[in-house]
């Protein structure tokens, strides 16, 4: 592989104008496709195999036109202290709002009058209008949203409190701020790392081109493949991350080759042949982690994983072709100021060298501190409770949260999470079901059944006593399912959330086994070792569990919650563990492959195990540190979001990358390798013969180049830039 990539790098360097033109053309074609494609809508959300989905499908079949998948809203009115919503003046204002809503949009399916539907609290202080729409929340037009938001303006002027809840106001979280912060920090870190604006600009430029092609392609194909507006979020985050990382690795190695005195074209070829091999295998591990999301069997997640994996493939191809082409245009400007002036490079050991030597002197101490420290942080993960956030997790300043609190105060906390029970049977079966549910603990109210036109299916609404995300509500859902028979199905947003969380929980171990298992085999091919991949996988698991512990401590227990703007503690988003495994595993293997490949390269070329560790850190520590700081900055930029879910993702990914890069890769990995010595690179002979030799460390390439007539390189010592 190293030989092929070496030739690819030299070819891209020589034909740099053609290569650059091809990538610009691809970006233009993707951009035109995105601009001319019809506007994407929300991707259909389904959870195959769950009871909530079966009930939902049954409703679609038996209650045609009922807009079972439509957006909903509740406009909540509260009278001033000492007054009631049943007073004539207040009643007139509410009925005026009902009329305005009905006339406000052709996407409205139904609007209920609270005085007809008995949607007034017992004390008379609170009333609400229920609104259902014909389309999902992501398909609502701006005009429909504005009409909803303006509802009750006159009622407010008359002294009533008016707040609006439900998923109809739910828009995609504002994206862009986190990415912009990440790009700015990345630029600063790259300038510090390289000491050259040109060298710092190349990874940023190529990452943006790669993300641009990936996101534009996703946008262009959104309607054809039912990708929806949510699919590009993960692709953008991962594409930006790995795009900067991979380009950083290639540029860093290119500068090292120039420092050894090689010509620019030869340096580009060798950089792609060596660091490029690490990029290919690091990219493969990320692709495995993302494509592996298909095992969860939730179509939306599968599409997100495949789309993000496609963006990673683009990032790898750009690193192998566009980077050497742009290096051809950059000339000597890719070097730092001192190197351009021909000033000698200092021979003093850099920080990576000094740290590696410290670890070699005290490997047991470093290993114990790292493992015990992460183990202590991981303890809260044992108390992990998973669920999906509702309006109760919104910031207290939002109208959704205020409406949620008003309904809880006026009607009880369970009113925000009604359960929809679907009975596949006639009136007698429905009546028996109502009686059975009334006898269950945790059910605050049960409505009379509503039959369809055929009279063979009924809908029953059940109001739990507790809030939607509570354990008591989850127990009630299970009790209804256990005691009501096969013909009774429970659905609704609350039940869908419970089933979604359970499905994610059930898929976690198979997903881990698939991703870690395939990556273990891949790393065994890369490192020609059994223990190095095993150590990489175990270290990753330790960092992810520790990160989950930190997430639980902050978002579930409330520790340091005020520091991170956590206004409401509660269960951890059910996607979080699998999401963290997929994203962090890919980035962790990037750092593992780049850092340890340099150690393997030095070891294969004759250095002793301890010397190889120092060599790997001398060349790789600075680059891996820069890459990790960039990723932490990208993810931490999302912590400032007002959305609890986005805040949680940003915090979880940032802390996970911190633990994995600085504790596992920088401390635990060298300590374990120091203790193992030569055994770290042991591979049974039969396995060595069975595994393909991909020559990641470039040993065959070195021999081939050494045999070339006039080759001046020989066995040069690796030089730090």
Image (tube, rainbow, N blue to C red):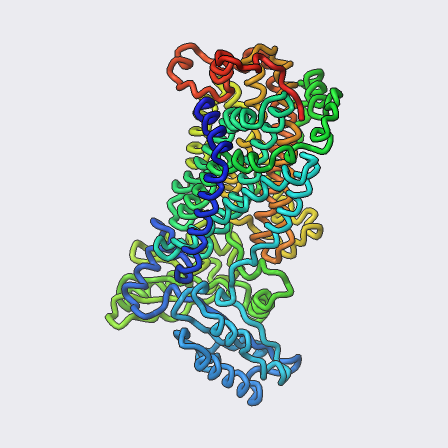
Q: Say which of 411 and 359 sits in front.
A: 359
- Extreme residue toward the bottom, this view: 88
Q: Would residue 98 be visible to someone looking at this image?
A: yes
Query: Residue placed at 30% from the left, 54% from the top?
Result: 486
Give how far across and how far down residue 88 sits, in percent.
55, 89
In the picture, which quadrant includes the N terminus? top left
Q: Would residue 375 be visible to someone looking at this image?
A: no
Is 706 situated above or below 579?
A: above
Find residue 110 and report its image quarter. Answer: bottom left
Is 262 situated above or below 659?
A: above
Q: Say which of 17 and 590 sits in front.
A: 17
Q: Is residue 163 left or right of residue 216?
A: right
Give how far across and how far down residue 650 sits, in percent.
60, 47
- Extreme residue toward the front, this view: 710
Find residue 242 and report its image quarter. Answer: top right
Find residue 676 and report its image quarter. Answer: top right
Is 268 situated above or below 478?
A: above
Is 251 situated above or below 49?
A: above
Give how far across and how far down residue 629 sits, in percent.
65, 38
In the picture, which quadrant includes the C terminus? top right
Q: Is residue 13 left or right of residue 33?
A: right
Q: Say which of 407 and 345 sits in front.
A: 345
Query: Residue placed at 44% from the left, 43% from the top?
Result: 22
Figure label count: 0
Q: Say which of 219 and 81 sits in front.
A: 219
Give how far across and how far down residue 63 sits, in percent.
30, 68
């Amino acid at each position: 592989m190293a030989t092929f990539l070496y030739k690819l790098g030299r070819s891209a360097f020589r034909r740099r104008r053609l290569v650059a033109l091809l990538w610009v053309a691809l970006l233009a074609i993707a951009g035109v496709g995105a601009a001319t494609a019809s506007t994407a809508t929300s991707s259909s959300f389904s959870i195959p195999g769950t009871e909530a989905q079966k009930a939902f499908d049954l409703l679609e079949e038996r209650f045609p036109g009922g807009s079972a998948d439509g957006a909903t809203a509740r406009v909540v009115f509260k009278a001033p202290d000492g007054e009631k919503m049943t007073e004539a003046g207040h009643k007139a204002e509410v009925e005026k709002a009902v009329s305005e809503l009905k006339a406000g949009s052709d996407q409205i399916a139904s609007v209920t009058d609270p005085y007809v539907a008995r949607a007034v609290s017992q004390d008379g202080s609170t009333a609400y209008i229920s609104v259902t729409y014909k389309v999902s929340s992501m398909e609502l037009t701006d005009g429909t949203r504005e009409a909803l938001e303006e509802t009750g303006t006159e009622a407010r002027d008359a002294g009533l409190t008016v707040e609006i809840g439900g998923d109809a106001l739910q828009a995609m979280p504002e994206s862009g701020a986190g990415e912009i912060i990440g790009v700015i920090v990345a630029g600063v870190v790259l300038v510090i790392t390289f000491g050259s604006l040109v060298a710092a600009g190349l990874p940023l430029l190529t990452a943006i081109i790669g993300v641009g092609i990936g996101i534009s392609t996703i946008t262009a194909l959104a309607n054809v493949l039912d990708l929806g507006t949510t699919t590009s979020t993960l692709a953008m985050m991962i594409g930006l991350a790995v795009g900067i990382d991979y380009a950083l690795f290639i540029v860093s190695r290119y500068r090292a080759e120039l420092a050894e005195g090689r010509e620019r074209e030869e340096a580009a070829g060798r950089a792609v042949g060596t660091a490029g091999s690490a990029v290919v295998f690091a990219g493969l591990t990320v692709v495995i982690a993302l494509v592996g999301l298909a095992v969860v069997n939730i179509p939306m997640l599968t599409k997100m994983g495949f789309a993000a994996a496609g963006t990673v493939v683009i990032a790898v191809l750009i690193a192998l072709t566009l980077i050497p082409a742009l290096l051809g245009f950059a000339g000597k400007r890719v070097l730092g100021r001192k190197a351009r002036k021909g000033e000698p490079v200092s021979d003093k050991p850099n920080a990576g060298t000094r740290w590696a030597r410290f670890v070699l002197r005290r490997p047991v101490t470093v290993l114990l501190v790292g493992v015990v420290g992460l183990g202590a942080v991981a303890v809260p993960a044992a108390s992990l409770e998973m669920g999906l956030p509702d309006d109760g997790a919104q910031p207290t300043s939002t109208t959704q949260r205020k409406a949620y609190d008003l309904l809880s105060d006026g009607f009880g906390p369970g009113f925000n999470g009604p359960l929809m029970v679907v009975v596949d049977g006639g009136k007698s079966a429905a009546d028996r079901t109502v009686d059975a549910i009334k006898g269950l603990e945790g059910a605050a109210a049960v409505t009379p059944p509503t039959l369809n036109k055929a009279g063979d299916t009924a809908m029953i609404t059940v109001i739990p006593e507790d809030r939607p995300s509570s354990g008591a509500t989850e127990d009630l859902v299970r009790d209804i399912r256990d005691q009501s028979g096969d013909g009774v199905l429970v659905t609704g947003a609350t039940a869908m959330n419970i089933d979604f969380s359970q499905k994610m929980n059930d898929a976690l171990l198979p997903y881990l086994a698939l991703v870690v298992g395939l990556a273990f085999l891949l790393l065994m091919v890369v490192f020609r070792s059994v223990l190095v991949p095993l150590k990489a996988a175990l270290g990753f698991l330790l960092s992810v569990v520790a990160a989950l512990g930190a997430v639980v401590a902050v978002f579930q227990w409330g520790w340091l919650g005020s520091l991170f703007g956590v206004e409401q503690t509660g269960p951890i988003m059910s996607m979080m563990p699998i999401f963290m495994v997929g994203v962090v595993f890919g980035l962790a293997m990037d750092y593992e492959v780049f850092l340890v490949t340099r150690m393997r390269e030095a070891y294969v070329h004759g250095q002793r195990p301890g010397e190889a560790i120092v060599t790997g850190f001398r060349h790789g520590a600075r680059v891996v540190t820069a890459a990790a700081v960039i990723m932490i900055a990208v993810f931490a930029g999302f912590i400032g979001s007002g959305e609890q879910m986005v805040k949680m993702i940003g915090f979880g990914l940032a802390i996970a990358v911190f633990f994995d890069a600085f504790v596992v890769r920088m401390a635990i990995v060298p300590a374990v390798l120091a203790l193992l010595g030569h055994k770290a690179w042991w591979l049974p002979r039969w396995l060595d013969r069975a595994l393909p030799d991909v020559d990641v460390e470039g040993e065959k390439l070195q021999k081939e180049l050494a045999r070339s007539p006039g080759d001046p390189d020989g066995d040069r010592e690796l030089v730090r830039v």
